[in-house]
Image: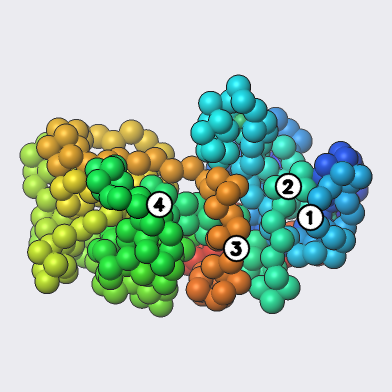
Amino acid sequence: MKAAVLYGKEELNIVPDFEDPVIKESDVLVKSKYTGLCSTDRTLYRGFVPFKPPLIIGHEIAGVVEELGKSAKGLDVGDHVIIPPVFPGCEDENCPACKEGLTNRCKNSVFIGHGVHGGDAELIAVPSKYTFKIKDSVPLEEACIIPDAVSTPFHALKSRSVPPHIIKNTLNSSKLFDQKTHWLKGKNVVVFGVGGVGGPTVNLAAKYFQAKNVLAVDIFDNKLDFAKKLGATQTVNSKSYFEENNIKFNELTGRDKAKAISGLARHISSHFAEDKFQVDCVLDCSGVSDTFPMAVETVSKNRTVIQVGWPPKPVQEFLNQKIMDKYLSINGTWACPMNELDENVKAVEDGIVDLDLLVTNKDYKLDSLENAIHDLEAGKILGRATICIE
Ligand SMILES: [Zn+2]
Ligand SMILES: [Zn+2]
C-alpha cells in the first residue's frame, strides 16, 4: 500500500509499496480516506518527541470499512468510520485508569500514528470496538478532524469544566454534564488561542454547550475573525492590547509582568460587565506557555482553568499562590474517553458543529504531506487542514 513513512527526523518518504497491515480477529481493516493534520505530526516530523521508525504518521482518520475480522462486531463493509487517535490497550481491572472509566488515560494506551502505524496510508487495522460509525451525510474530508481536533475540546468542555464544589452541592449532579442542562449553559467562557483545537473549542462552547458568551483571545486578527464565524461573541487581540497600552510584554519580568497580565485579564473580563465581570471557565488552547498565567488571572474565583493545548516550556515567574487564593480548579485534559465519542459524533451528524468552517484547507494530498507540515509550521493554516489519501 502507499504510505507516508517517517524513517527518522525530517525523513518523511511517500512509499508506494509499504507492507499492508494484517488484521486480528477483533479488528477491522479500514481504507483511510482523509486525515486531519495535527501539530503532533509536525512534532514527530521534527523529531521533538521520540518514536520508533519506520512509522506511518497520521492520527485523525476517517475512512471506509474494507474488511472485517472474524469476531469484529457492529460494523459492515462499506461503513463510513472515524478512528480515535488514542484508545485503551487493556480495559483491565488492574489498570487504574480503565477501572475508573478513563479509557483515554489507560496505562497501556495505544497512540495511532505515534506508538503504532497511523492513517497516512491507504489501509489501517484497528480494533472494531474502537472504530466509530458515522453517517454518510458527513463528508469524510471533514469527519477526519472529529477524532482529535473536535473530540479533545468536546471532552474538556463536557467533563473538565465543572468546579468540584458545584458537583458536590448539586442534587442531581449528572445533569451538570448533559448537553441540554450542562453547567456551561448561559456561562461566560474564555478561550486562549484560536488554532486547530481552539477553533473547535469556541464552536462547541457556543453552539453545543450554549455558553452565553465565548470570548476568544489570540495575537492574530484573522484568527479572531475566524473565531467570530465559529460563534465567538467577543474577541481580544492580546498583542494589540499590550501595544496600545505601551506595554513591551516580552521585555517584562517580575512585578511588571504580573501587572501587565492583570491588566489584560481586567480588559478581558470587562466584556462581561453586565455579569459582574464573571469568567466561569478559561480554556488554554494556545500551545504556548505564556498564556497559562493569563488564564489563571482571567478566570473568576472558584472556577476552572483547563489546559487543552500542549505547552512547550515550563511557565516562568508564575505566582502559584493565585491558584490557592482564587480557589481554582486547574484541570488537565487528554483526548476523549471512548464513552463520549458517540455523543460527539451525534453532535456533528445533527449539524451542531460547523465542520465545514473548521476545516479550512482541503487541497493537500498524501504526496504533499511534507508541504502541508511546512505550511502548518509557517502559520499558513487558519483552522484544520485535511490530507486526501488517494
Ligand atoms: Zn492530533
Ligand atoms: Zn487500561
User: Image height check: is 174 above or below 47?
Assistant: below
Left or right, 10 with reference to 79: left
> Looking at the image, which is closer to me, 311 or 333?
333
Left or right, 299 with reference to 378: left
Left or right, 13 with reference to 97: right
Label number found at residue 74? 1
Residue 304 in view (yes/no): no
Which numbered disc flags the more N-terminal residue, 4 or 2? 2
Which numbered disc flags the more N-terminal residue, 1 or 4? 1
Tell us which disc is closer to us: 3 or 1.
1
- For the residues marked 4 and 2, what is the alpha-carbon distance in whole angstroms? 26 Å
- For the residues marked 2 and 1, what is the alpha-carbon distance in whole angstroms? 8 Å
Which numbered disc flags the more N-terminal residue, 3 or 4? 4
Give the residue type at disc 4. Answer: Ser
Image x and y of residue 88, in percent: 64, 37
Q: Residue at x 70, y 70 (%)?
A: 135
Q: Residue at x 55, y 76 (%)?
A: 351
Dot 1: element: loop
Q: Indicate the colouring scheme.
A: rainbow
> Looking at the image, which is closer to me, 322 or 177?
177
Tell us which disc is closer to us: 1 or 4.
4
Question: Cβ–Cβ below 8 Å for labels 3 and 4?
Answer: no
Question: Cβ–Cβ below 8 Å for labels 2 and 1?
Answer: yes
Give the residue type at disc 2. Answer: Lys
- For the residues marked 3 and 1, what is the alpha-carbon distance in whole angstroms? 16 Å
Label number found at residue 345? 3
Image x and y of residue 57, in percent: 69, 46
Dot 3: element: helix
- For the residues marked 3 and 4, what is the alpha-carbon distance in whole angstroms? 20 Å
- Residue annotated with mark 4: 174
